[in-house]
Image (cartoon, rainbow, N blue to C red):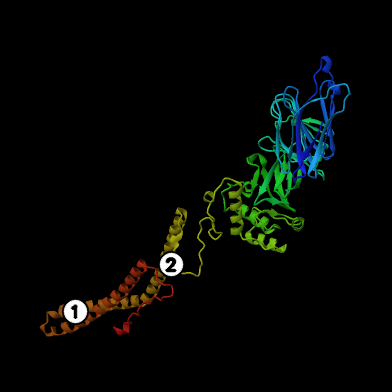
Amino acid sequence: MSTTVSLGSSSEYTMSFDIQPRDGGGSRGHKDTSDMRVTFGGKEMSISSDSDGNLTVDGDSSISIVTHTIDDGWTRVEARYDGISGDESELLIEGTGAEDTYGMLLDNIKIVSSASVSVTVEGTESGDTLIANDTIDRYSSGDGDDVIFSGSRDDHIDGGAGVDRVVYSGSRDDYAIFKSLNDKYVIEDKRADATDGTDTVVNVEEFTFADGTVDQANLGATNRAIVVDGIVGGLEYVTSSGLTGYTQDDGSFDYLDGDTVTFKLGSVTIGDIDMGDISDEKVFLQDIADVDRTDMNDEYVENMAVLLQSLDSDSGDNIIITEEMRDAFSTEEFDLATISEDDLKAIIEETGRDAVSEDDAMEHVQDMLVDYTNLEDGDFDDRVSDDEDDGVLVVDNTDESVDMSALSTDDESEDVDSTDEERADDATTDSQEQDSETTEATVDDSEDTDSIDESQAQDEDQVDGESDADESQAQDEDLNNILPENSSDDAQIDSSSQDVSSDSSSQVSEQNSNDTASAPDPTVEVKIDDQPSVDAI
């Protein structure tokens, strides 16, 4: 059978048709001879059947072919042709079995332009054989025990129920295999030509490679996560299970269940993290520092952010650490959790890079958390300047107008009250010492007064003696005029003595009173007036 097919402007076409070998029994029991050949655009595809009706489909290397069972013994064949040119092309379908036998049953022949076509193939409840190609990129094989052959595209394969198997052309070591959190396996062809592409596989129990078949439990799949401050690529990692490498340009790294992962830059340890604590396949700087992801003031997080962003060779949001930067830190040894901001800045600038400010670095950290999680800007802690060291006010000592009431916390208020009390005690002590000095001065100056008092006392005794004589003489009316004159002298002596004593004690009392009221300026001299001498009396 042949026909002419009118072509359009495309050079890519997909042809599909359903076939069935003739059943056994009677005169038509010739399954093993119902072979056929299909030619389109000068490219041949052959289909043969054995006595049990099992099909083998093969064709030109430029044809991508997939087959899968539909129902009642029918098989659908889909073939993608590339490089078909011209306005028209011949389609030729011919039997290649014995001349005296019937060929295969053929139905539903279609040819369509297939440029940029993505096709999903679904299997049935029976066992299917699906062959991936450059056109088909999604396979859902149904409930049977299915066999799926990987193709060159990045395929999405769902084995469905049953015991399903995916077949790859290379050896196991040709592929990187890791498992995501939703139990999907990503199988990446590492060969230069990447013949099998990168497949995402779920509900498949067995995997066949050129060197053998393994079940899911023995596949040796790793887990995969990414480091995010932006995406951080080029960062060395070492896992507790022995995996090593550098984070990829997409920030990804591999690990096994139960692993603790250590990230390094040269000889500097960025940090460690127990991957059992990660639930979303993303590692942020806060996770490494073991603080909440909304913490924007942790010193360890700030140091990591400043270091990584300062060494970035990428102009976008992502961070790429080059081999040059890793080498620059091959001899450095410092603890990122405790190093000071100034010391870290100096180390960074030794590499010829400018250190990013902490505020700019943490702004970028917050932006990336918003981009890669469900956090929003309002969820994060407010940034606190380093000058506000945990609520302790930093005071410029040259500012005499500082109001110490600005210390807002209770503990700080108690500290201020305690300080005031100590100052008051110090002032009282100073005052008492000054009072003591004043008293000593008063005592010293009063020695003359004591001498005066003794002299006055002797004079008073003399006066008293004279007074007694005067009383005796008072009986003599001739001596009456003497007493008033002598009494006046006595009064003058008594008055002078009282004035001296009163003036001295008054000044000391007044000084003590002033000292009690307020501590005197230590530069003020306390002075006691000189006492009058005996000769002045």
Residue that mark 1 sits on: 469
Element assignment for label 2: helix
Residue that mark 2 sits on: 430
How many discs appear? 2
Residue at x 18% of width, y 84% of height: 485
Lateral position of residue 429 relative to residue 82, left or right: left
The one of 460 and 17 positioned closer to us in this rendering: 17
Q: Is residue 176 visible?
A: no
Quarter where residue 135 is shown: top right
Residue at x 69% of width, y 28% of height: 142
In the rendered image, residue 347, in percent from the top left (x then y), is placed at 69, 61
Kind of residue indicated by mark 1: Ala
The one of 404 and 267 positioned closer to us in this rendering: 267
Figure quadrant of the C terminus:
bottom left
In the rendered image, residue 112, in percent from the top left (x then y), is placed at 73, 38
Quarter where residue 153 is shown: top right
In the rendered image, residue 423, in percent from the top left (x then y), is placed at 44, 63
